[in-house]
Image (cartoon, rainbow, N blue to C red):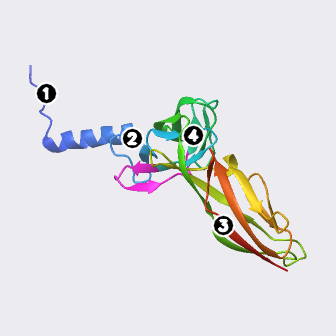
């Protein structure tokens, strides 16, 4: 019996390429996401505090891009932490869970721990602000303040919605529980925020007519 004709090098390469194209897996295109990295990795967040997550995609040609706003975000245990469509996580209760970013069948994950953290300082923004009683349309103007806590481990967190806001005198400026200040009368006032008994340096608000 005659031996089958040996496969030449060229025919072997062509057969291999045909198999690769048929499978569609060996050579992903430059627009195909092959991996997703989620950051920060294994973060610790206090209850009620927010943490912004980012997602970086790696494509078939090894290029990378920020896809934070293009992936589907979720947490495995929403009773511990929730996350918005833009990757903003909020600690809910003490515990651990997993943060997941998904695009098609590609998934990136990282762990997150929700635990109480000791605040050593609080900073608020803006430090100086001008408001008007009458505004442009006869309506008093407002400004949204934010509060950032620095913890004992030197990490930081947004505590805007989890601190006590104070404006003095309140006859000049009023402030809501979430840090929204509103002009009341002409004068100068100070705004501060307190979290875990730690009070921020004061910001100055000047109110004109």
- Upstream in sequence: badge 3 or badge 4: 4
Q: Which residues are magenta?
A: 56-71
- Upstream in sequence: badge 3 or badge 1: 1
**Mark 3 vs mark 2: in front:** 3
- CA–CA distance in space, label 2 to label 1: 30 Å
Judge by depth and name the residue closer to the eye, 31 or 67.
67
- Upstream in sequence: badge 4 or badge 2: 2
92 relative position to 187: left or right: left
- CA–CA distance in space, label 4 to label 2: 44 Å
Question: What element does badge 4 sit on?
Answer: loop
Q: Position of residue 98 (x, y in %)?
A: 51, 33
In the image, which disc is placed on residue 46? 4
Question: What element does badge 3 sit on?
Answer: strand
The question of residue 33 being in magenta is answered with no
Task: Give the labeled residue for mark 3.
Answer: 203
Q: Are marks 2 and 1 in contact (CB under 8 Å)?
A: no
Task: Give the labeled residue for mark 2.
Answer: 24
- CA–CA distance in space, label 3 to label 4: 25 Å
Q: Name the residue at 14% across, 42% down.
A: 9
């Amino acid at each position: 019996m005659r031996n089958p004709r040996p496969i030449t090098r060229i025919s072997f390469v062509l057969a291999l390429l045909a198999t690769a194209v048929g499978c569609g897996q060996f050579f992903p295109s430059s627009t195909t996401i092959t991996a997703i990295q989620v950051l920060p990795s294994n973060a610790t967040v206090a209850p009620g505090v927010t943490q912004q997550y980012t997602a970086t995609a790696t494509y078939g040609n090894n290029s990378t891009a920020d896809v934070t706003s293009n992936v589907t975000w979720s947490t495995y245990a929403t009773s511990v932490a929730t996350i918005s469509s833009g990757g903003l996580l909020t600690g809910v209760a003490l515990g651990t869970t997993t943060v997941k970013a998904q695009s098609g069948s590609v998934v990136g994950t990282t762990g997150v721990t929700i635990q109480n953290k000791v605040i050593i300082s609080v900073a608020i923004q803006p430090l100086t602000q001008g408001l008007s009683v009458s505004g442009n349309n006869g309506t008093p103007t407002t400004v949204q303040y934010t509060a950032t806590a620095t913890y004992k481990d030197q990490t930081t967190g947004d505590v805007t919605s989890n601190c006590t806001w104070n404006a003095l005198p309140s006859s000049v400026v009023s402030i809501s529980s979430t840090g929204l200040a509103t002009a009341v009368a002409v004068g100068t006032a100070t705004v501060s925020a307190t979290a875990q008994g730690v009070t921020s340096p004061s910001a100055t608000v000047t109110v004109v007519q």
